Amino acid sequence: LTAMVIARIGGHPGWWAHFYFSCVELQNSMAGFKPPFSLAVMLKGYVNGAMNALSGNHWIELLAACLLGWRLLATADRGAGPRFNALMFALAIAVAGKFASFPLPEDRYYFALVAGMILLIVTNWKPQFSSVPPRPR
């Protein structure tokens, strides 16, 4: 209720106009912009978001690499147990949920989630950099 009041006072055009503007077709002005709701147009917005994410951004590839890394750690018995798996699962579904709730393709929305997955994987991989012989001087 509070969010609706703040949005109304702030002049936010509403979720459908915002979705349409962001995912379907850019507008020169949002003044008086009230497109009619349509499931077909909404589906078009999701397709546009997916295609833009695949063609111009890298978060999908990074997410796939994180999921593969998670699987490889589990296969090699290097997973850290239930906490690690719970955090990886939470971050993975957060990325999917963010895209499902509003399919904006830009990396900036997913960076923190994917970076968290990368940090968890590296932490549990535990590479031994100290075992590398020192460089000759």
Image (cartoon, rainbow, N blue to C red):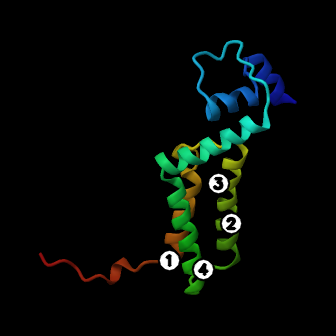
Tell me, yes or no, whether the two marked residues, 4 and 1, touch with CB atoms within 8 Å.
Answer: no
Specify which label sits upstream in the sequence, 4 or 2.
Answer: 4
Above or below 116: residue 16:
above
* Cα separation between marks 4 and 1: 8 Å
Amino acid type, callout 4: Gly
Q: Quadrant of residue 45?
A: top right
Amino acid type, callout 3: Val
Q: Which residue is mark 2?
A: 89
List x then y, in percent, for residue 93. 69, 59
Amino acid type, callout 1: Trp
List x then y, in percent, for residue 76. 55, 86
- Residue lying at 48% horizontally and 53% vertically, measured from the top left: 58
| Direction from residue 92 to residue 54 in the image, left or right | left
Q: Which residue is mark 4?
A: 79
Q: Which residue is mark 3?
A: 95
| Direction from residue 20 to residue 118 in the image, left or right | left
- Residue lying at 51% horizontally and 66% vertically, measured from the top left: 65
Q: Secondary structure at mark 1?
A: helix
Crowding at mark 2 (Cα within 10 Å: few <14, some 14-19, many 20+): some
Tell me, yes or no, whether the two marked residues, 1 and 3, touch with CB atoms within 8 Å.
Answer: no
Q: Which residue is mark 1?
A: 125
* Cα separation between marks 4 and 2: 13 Å
Q: Nearer the viewer, residue 18 or 92?
A: 18
